[in-house]
Image (cartoon, helix red, strand yellow):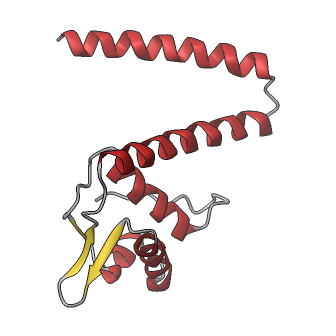
Amino acid sequence: MEIRIESDSRIPIYAQIEDQVRAMIAAGQLRPGNQLPTIRQLAAELRINYNTVAHAYMELDRAGVITTQRGRGTFVAELLDKAEMAQLRDRQLCGILRASLKEANRLGYSTDEVAAAFHRELSRWLRENETSEEE
């Protein structure tokens, strides 16, 4: 499990961890039943405070995304059915788009500039994916 922390981000570190775990589940990189690193392992790997990782895991557990089994470890929850997974994927994708739009707004791009760039990049992305699917 590879998590990247942006220390200069305005997003709290625990939330970055939480968001990335959710994203990995939504993308199918983490599947129900997969074991997560222990809090101590992840804190050491990321070189952050143990309590920060504990906070992220607590929020994920509270949301039913992961489950902790005393003496066994922390695992991706089995509860996600197709509808829940689709909802999780949609929330994750919308979050990515909102973050990009927020950043574009912060940098002063107009709605027309953002829309034009989005359509250009979407067309490029579709062409690239058509090519990779045909191979």
Going 23% across and 15% down the picture, which residue do you hit? 133
Q: Quadrant of the C terminus?
A: top left
**In the figure, is residue 13 to the left or right of 72?**
right
* Viewer-side residue, 55 vs 68: 68
**In the figure, is residue 29 to the left or right of 46?**
left
Going 44% across and 46% down the picture, which residue do you hit? 87
Expressed as whole percent of the image width and height from the top left, the position of residue 115 reads 68, 18
Expressed as whole percent of the image width and height from the top left, the position of residue 94 reads 55, 40
- Vertical comparison of 49 with 18: above or below: below
Q: Find residue 68 and report its image quarter.
A: bottom left
Going 60% across and 19% down the picture, which residue do you hit? 118
Q: Find residue 37 and report its image quarter.
A: bottom left
Expressed as whole percent of the image width and height from the top left, the position of residue 35 reads 21, 69
* Viewer-side residue, 48 vs 61: 61
Q: Find residue 101 and report its image quarter.
A: top right
**In the figure, is residue 1 to the left or right of 51?**
left
**In the figure, is residue 102 to the left or right of 76?**
right
- Vertical comparison of 67 with 83: above or below: below
